[in-house]
Image (cartoon, helix red, strand yellow):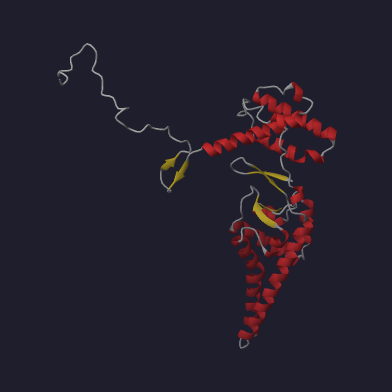
Amino acid sequence: MSELVTGEAVALELRPAKLPSRALAVLIDLIVAVLVYVAVVIGLVAATSSLDDAAQAALSVAAFLLVLVGGPIAVETLSHGRSLGKLAFGLRVVRDDGGPVRFRHALVRGGVGMIEILMTFGVVACIASLVSERGRRLGDVFAGTLVVRERIPVGRAGVVPPPAPELAGRFAELDLSGVPDGLWLAVRQYLTRMHQLQPQVSWSMASRLAADVAARTGAAVPPDLQARPAEFLAAVVHERQSRQARQARQAPRYEGGGDHMVSSVSPPAVAPVSEENVKAPEAPRGRSTGFAPPA
């Protein structure tokens, strides 16, 4: 797992693609590109049979550059990092900060890829991917990109377990504003993977995270939960999610695309106007009203 940090200081968890899946994806792309290139060359030969050999050779070189080099660049740019081979294996090319690639990224990857993939039959690309910590070839290094997996098996996707019923709502008064996002991310990662750890390691990590959360909130871990730090973390995360859900429901919403704000809080009820609840204004005491009441 690779943790990337975006420009907004948001931590992203991206799983770099392995070399076998990348190699198979490149193989599919090359097969498709070669088939298109052969079809283009056959069409050019049939259409330019009256030209001399030099002109036909120039058109062949142009077709090679257009199809085998320009084609992947155009596909990667228009699809934001998804080629046919990458779609087949659930891969995608992204920037180092996790954002979508642009033309300049695809251009650098395609230009370097012509050397390390086409001219060396992929040997240089395989060596560079094996040496790189995140499996990047030279084109990725120069372009500042990374090939990641978009589709992760469902069985591996972790879900934060709910807290025990007796702990639901117990930490409603706890101040969670001082807990940073990085610590929340670490707690969520632990809760989704704690069953994959050894019991002693899992308890040690939970105790350390619970102590960090308690230090940030200013309240110690309850004595009855000190031996069950994982349950304390699950209850605190559940409380944070509940607060976020309530804030989302109470947040004002905008309608009509203008500046008309509609609040989700209902206005106070107003009693209907009738003769019974309308009273004449009383005159100030000690002063004359200036007229006498009718007889």
From the viewer's side, name the closer residue of 178 and 156.
156
In what quadrant of the picture does the C terminus appear?
top left
| Count of numbered circles in the view | 0
Q: Is residue 61 visible?
A: yes
In the image, taking residue 24 as reference, residue 73 lies left or right, namely: left
Residue at x 41%, y 46% (from the top left corner): 258
Identity of the residue furthest to the front in this view? 295
From the viewer's side, name the closer residue of 156 and 281.
281
Residue at x 73%, y 56% (from the top left corner): 137
Question: Residue 40: horizontal and vertical position, in percent?
Answer: 65, 78
Q: Quadrant of residue 88?
A: bottom right
Identity of the residue furthest to the top in this view? 286
Residue at x 76%, y 48% (from the top left corner): 156
Question: Residue 149: horizontal and vertical position, in percent?
Answer: 71, 53
Question: Residue 195: horizontal and vertical position, in percent?
Answer: 80, 39
Q: Is residue 125 visible?
A: no
Q: Considering only vertical position in the picture, is 65 above or below 243?
A: below
Q: Quadrant of residue 198?
A: top right
From the viewer's side, name the closer residue of 174 and 43.
174
Question: Residue 231: horizontal and vertical position, in percent?
Answer: 74, 31
Residue at x 46%, y 38% (from the top left corner): 263
In the image, taking residue 103 as reference, residue 140 lies left or right, namely: right
Identity of the residue furthest to the bottom in this view? 50
